[in-house]
Image: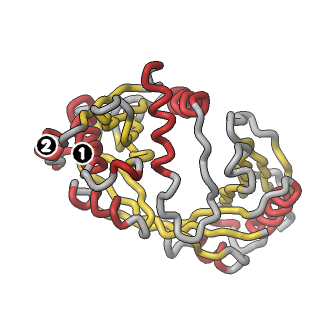
Amino acid sequence: MSIQIVPLADPHPGAASHRLVWLASDGDGVPVGAAFLRLFEREGQDHLAELELNVHPAERRGGVGSELLARAVAGAEAEGRRCVLAQAGADTPGDRFLAARGFRKVLTLTYARLALAHADVDAVADSPHAGYRLLSWDGTVPDELAGTFTASRRAMDDMPMDDTDYGVVVWDVDRVRAAAKAVADRGESLHTVVAVDESDGSIAGFTELVVPGDGKGDGRHYGTGVLPEHRGHGLARWMKAEAIRQARERYPDLGGLLADTADGNTHMRAVNDSLGYRPTHRTFQYQLDL
């Protein structure tokens, strides 16, 4: 089969990244695959590119994926990137494709789901935690909390990532607001629950949940983190329980909540297990060092 690869312009460049895109078509001009290479631009991650590559099942094993991969790798090298990350479901064609082309497996993620109809979290959410209180908001962080919320993002800096060369996400208030705006622009709702240190009013930890705009289907957990100096008090489980309760009460048509956790993050996996999340599948993160 004759393959034509056409580079495309990214119609939606982000505040912290941009994409290179390639479309593969057959001799009749019918699309058969595409590659999307996200290039991070902010300090701490400007060495990194993330690849998403898809080929129509009927056209696999014909060289389309290999040609798209070659274009993406060349694009990453031309942009001065140190590594390319790609994700694939365990025991899928993508898993085998990446393993056969020089990528090494650096991280395993376990996905889990909580059925909201069976969520029994009130006792956890209502349990007192001496010296702390819970706050929550929808969408963008309120101005009066923007500084301390931004400072609390460093709670994610030591999140277990095994051998992944993911770098460090450097947050400022503008980036926090831009992330919330990106969720809203997709038509989804962002909900944040934080634990506040009552001694000084600073945020000690946070958890974020994104719900589809129609309030149906499944919501998704985003980041959950507790600052190192506040760990050991059960704050992550407390905040997540409150976020679950709010989702259950506010979205009666929401079926469940999804979470993905690195296998090496044994603490967060234990938190999810204790709240009733049940594993659904696993994916592997692969890395190609350039």
Residue 255: mark in rendering: none
Q: Position of residue 222 (x, y in %)?
A: 44, 45
Q: Quadrant of residue 48?
A: bottom right
- The amino acid beneath tag 1 is Trp
What is the quadrant of the C terminus in the image? bottom right
The residue shown at (45%, 40%) is: 152
The residue shown at (42%, 32%) is: 190
Residue furthest to the left in view is 123
Does the image show residue 34?
no
In the picture, measured across the screen, residue 52 lies left or right of residue 113, that is right
Front residue of 143 and 186: 143
In the picture, measured across the screen, residue 74 lies left or right of residue 250, that is right
The residue shown at (47%, 58%) is: 159
Disc 1: which residue:
238
Residue furthest to the bottom in view is 100
In the picture, measured across the screen, residue 218 lies left or right of residue 18, that is left
Q: Quadrant of residue 15?
A: top right
Q: Position of residue 259 (x, y in %)?
A: 38, 53
Number of marks drawn: 2
User: Crowding at label 2, few (<14), some or many (≥20) Cα neighbours within 10 Å?
Assistant: few
Q: Position of residue 231 (x, y in %)?
A: 33, 53
Q: Earlier in the sequence, mark 2 or mark 1?
A: 2
The Cα–Cα distance between marks 2 and 1, rounded to whole angstroms, is 8 Å
Does the image show residue 88?
yes
Q: Position of residue 186 (x, y in %)?
A: 53, 31
Residue 127: mark in rendering: 2
